[in-house]
Image (spheres, rainbow, N blue to C red):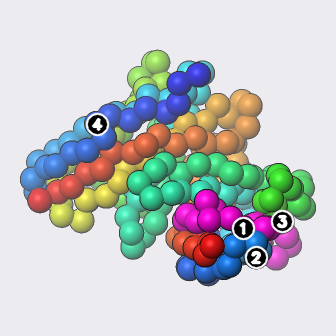
Amino acid sequence: KAGVTQTPRYLIKTRGQQVTLSCSPISGHRSVSWYQQTPGQGLQFLFEYFSETQRNKGNFPGRFSGRQFSNSRSEMNVSTLELGDSALYLCASSALYRGPEAFFGQGTRLTVV
Amino acid sequence: GENVEQHPSTLSVQEGDSAVIKCTYSDSASNYFPWYKQELGKRPQLIIDIRSNVGEKKDQRIAVTLNKTAKHFSLHITETQPEDSAVYFCAASMGGGSQGNLIFGKGTKLSVKP
């Protein structure tokens, strides 16, 4: 069974630009959560999608948004990039009906210059 | 807001010794507590978890204990090996665990010296 896949693995963007990251969950998993990982703040919850609906949102500005498609693949978008958005963005998928275990993708390393 | 505190932030042990990492959580509704191991440049890997109706769970050299009254849970690694060196994160579910979102501690960097 394929694991959680995130694309791209690395991105370099300029301040003010926008970026879209993609996450394909484990087959059969309908919940996708996104996290921002930085050395100072650790793993911080961005939002969670289940059956194409955002169920929870963390404490991030409105520049961070996401969506989920009918095949459970999810995208997150960051607009008007700031230097402080440089981080590793991780997504995790869960089956939920089998239990809350969350499995992470390898992440997308975003660098804003 | 809800949070998870994790201690210590760094831990250095000799090979063969035990290591203990402790976490406290604030959300009384939390009922699922996973632990993740993250090696340098890799994704966090789920190594063990515990649910609120259980006080202790073991898997070979690792164990987790939970005290719901005190809102504490801990990871215990016995007979540590150099390959145990990594950053370990504890987490607690939000919203009762039926939803896929976790609050993470800030991590513990474990170094096991040969």
Find the distance from the CA under tag 4 to the CA under tag 3: 38 Å
Find the distance from the CA under tag 2 to the CA under tag 3: 19 Å
Task: Give the magenta part as a residue range.
Answer: B64-89
The chain letter for the residue carrying disc 1 is B
Q: Earlier in the sequence, mark 2 or mark 3?
A: 2
User: Is residue B78 inside the magenta stretch?
Assistant: yes
Q: Amino acid at mark 3?
A: Thr
**Image x and y of residue A68, in percent:** 42, 29
Q: Amino acid at mark 4?
A: Pro
Disc 2, SS: loop
Residue marked by disc 1: B80
Q: Earlier in the sequence, mark 1 or mark 2?
A: 2
* Residue A8, disc: 4
The C terminus of chain A, quarter of image: bottom left
Disc 1, SS: loop
**Residues packed near mark 2 inside 10 Å, few (<14), some (14 to 19) or many (20 plus):** some
